[in-house]
Image: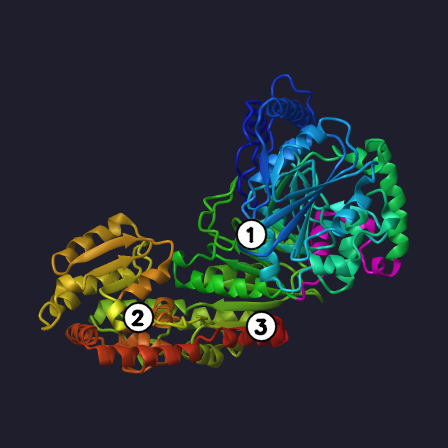
Amino acid sequence: MTVSVFGPSPRELLRRLKRGLKLRVLGAGRPMATPPQGCSGDPQGDANRSLAAASQLALNAFLASPAKLHLGAKGDGPLVSLVLVLFNKAHLTYACLQHLQQLQHTNLDVLIVDNNSNDQTPELLSRLEGRVKVLRQSENLHFLRACNLAFAQLDPEARYVALVNNDALLDAAIINHALQVFDRWPGTGIVGGQILHLDGQLQEAGSLICRDGSCRGLGRRQSPWQPLVHTRRRVDYVSGCFLVIQSALLRQLGGFDPRFAPAYYEETDLCVGSWKLGRPVVYEPRCLVHHVEFASASQASGQGRKAAELLMQTNQRHFRDKHANWLQEQPPAQAFQDLPAVEQACRLQAHPIRLLWVDDKLPNPAQGAGFGRLETLIRTLADRGCFVTLFATDLAETGTPPDLSCHSLNADYELHWGGADALNQLLDTRKSFYTHVVASRRHNQELLLEWLRTHPTKPTQPLLIADVESVFSIREQSRNHLQRTQQIATAAELLSSKSLTAELAALKGFDQVWAVSQLEADLLAEHTGSDVHLVGHAFASPAQPPSYTNTAGLLFMGAMNYPGLPNLDSLAWLADAVLPALRQQPHLNPEQAPLTIIGPYRGSLVQPLLDRLQTVWPTIHLGPVAQVEPVLRSHRLLLAPTRFAAGLPHKVQHGISMGVPVITTELIASQMGWSNGEGLLASNNAIEFARLIAQLYSDPGLWQQVQAGGLARIRRDCDPLRLQSAMANSLGMSSNNLT
């Protein structure tokens, strides 16, 4: 099971084209469960024939009209030159050009080589306008020579070259997604995408090269509902039906090697050349292509599919001779008979860290502070070339993906989900693959330890890491203490709790423990004897923090969607004690300082609290918001009246990093290792808490002092480089690998 983005099915796309509408692939089509009535039982063949018929009808209608096709655009961003080689197949070319019209990238030119087509292609090309150049040939140069001709005439300003086959139907965002890879993984040489047949099955999700020079497209003729398909990763090569290469690299490689003329293996050779220069080839799953495979085979050989297959065999021998030394490091062909072996082969290459992370949910900050930190950590690892698999134990195990609207990292990691059985199966099939396994939360740590108890230690056993986002028993103890005494517990009272024993004992089965705060790191080091690393939060502060005069209002933020959460108690304390006391403070008009509340919530839990709040203070409830930071920066104060908690307060540090002064409790200040007045204000007393609100809200000098102190401290405590260094040290990497 995996993440997938679906749009109209291929059958719907064909229906639209038959009606004369523009054919546009918005996402990967669902594979047909059963062939439609009247079909042959060959979904791929049926879809291809339907496309041919529909596109021919659409082309005829277009040529009978005065309409034109506008290609290319001059706009912002790096110039991308699209190269398209044609020989007949005008109906496919028309469908391809319809998609090129819809590309979202704003700075494009199109270079077309027509290999002396004798069908409707010349007439179609006469209808083109815009930023497009057509190179008409008097003979069929075939694919490779035609491409090299186009490469020699590229605009010198072009930073990237996109190679597109005329039997490829591109998603509108494909160029933008490809360029993002070059930005996120500096040093990348070539980017390719997810290639689908018209029946929705995969042609390939990146490809691998065997020791004998043969090639294997990953996931071929399988459903796109697989984790491997939706994971950005380095591969041996990507299909030439769509690839993007840096133009400087293309010049350095000299274009396509003529020994592979007329076609086939030329893109494989180009990708290996990129690898030899230290420039990885990357598969980007968001680059979606529907491909009519072998439809343009006559371009290559002039003789159709059978001759094309013979030509591929010949060029495989040329490829094997040229790259004999490089191929010795590739896995043998028989390794691809086993799917886990395929998966491992594609990942072992260039991924020094292959990490399995076991947690409850997707890394979405709206789910809670721990998941905001999870997002930061996974993004840090993925951006630095580590391969990360996230196994989410709290997502339903069904035949289709659950609601993944909060899947914020997209292709940055491989996603699996399910219960204990599914986790055990993944561990069984990949027990020699992962270099590190991280488990967050006690129940997930116990699942992992149980698997280890039933499996003998192997020489390749990964480094086991317990990520302690918070010592849960500390939070429970602080809540129990509050309920019993109506007082907020001190750090000393919490650390003396006997309930810590069992939680800490379970951690002794791990090689390392990650803690989020120095307070808990010291506790874990003392009681577990483990190798403890401080891996907390990371925040980048804005160059221009908000000013006093440009802010207004009070802000409360946090998850309120489960009973017993600290944020629900915080709201109750605000309603019943703090805000009534705040109304007694002079110099603060409630109408000029309304309370805004944001965060995921359950109505049955929050509405009674809102009713109580609104009786004492103007209150605005926004619920969950897509972008938290603009809301933070517009408010003058962030209130965090948290009376029981553990770990490190993500929202407090986030607010301070944005330049928003915070008023919180002494408990939170002590967990952060901060003192009252040192970048924040804190009190456990409701009346004093209210006084601090009124004072800080109405005193610009004090506000600026607290803001400056908080920013200075947060830049030290939560510097992203500090987090990267801590992770590099823990994982046994050079810090250069994570910077």
Query: Residues in magenta?
Result: 324-352
Q: Secondary structure at mark 2?
A: helix
Disc 3 residue crowd, few under 14, some 14–19, many 20+, Cα 10 Å: few
**What number is the disc on residue 440?**
none
Disc 1 residue crowd, few under 14, some 14–19, many 20+, Cα 10 Å: many
N-terminal of the two: label 3 or label 2? Answer: 2
**What number is the disc on residue 739?**
3
- Amino acid found under the numbered disc labelled 2: Ser
Residue 31 at x, y percent in the picture: 60, 33
Which image quarter: residue 159? Answer: bottom right
N-terminal of the two: label 1 or label 3? Answer: 1
Which residue has dot 2 on it? 478
**Where, quadrant-wise, is the N terminus in this rendering?**
top right
Is 185 rendered above or below residue 203?
A: below
- Amino acid found under the numbered disc labelled 3: Thr
Q: Secondary structure at mark 1?
A: strand
Residue 389 at x, y percent in the picture: 58, 57
Residue 94 is at least partly visible in this image: yes
Q: Residue furthest top?
A: 38
- Say which residue appears at 72% left-offset and 35% top-offset: 293
- Say which residue appears at 32% left-offset and 56% top-offset: 599
Q: Is residue 265 left or right of residue 530?
A: right
Report how far apart the C-alphas of labels 3 and 2 lie in the structure. Answer: 38 Å
Residue 640 is at least partly visible in this image: no
Between label 3 and label 2, give the one nearer the viewer: 3
Is 499 rendered above or below residue 24?
A: below
Disc 2 residue crowd, few under 14, some 14–19, many 20+, Cα 10 Å: many
Residue 710 at x, y percent in the picture: 34, 78
User: Along the line of sight, which residue is nearer the eye, 492 or 205?
Assistant: 205
Which residue has dot 1 on it? 415
Dominant secondary structure, magenta: helix
Is 249 rendered above or below residue 286?
A: below
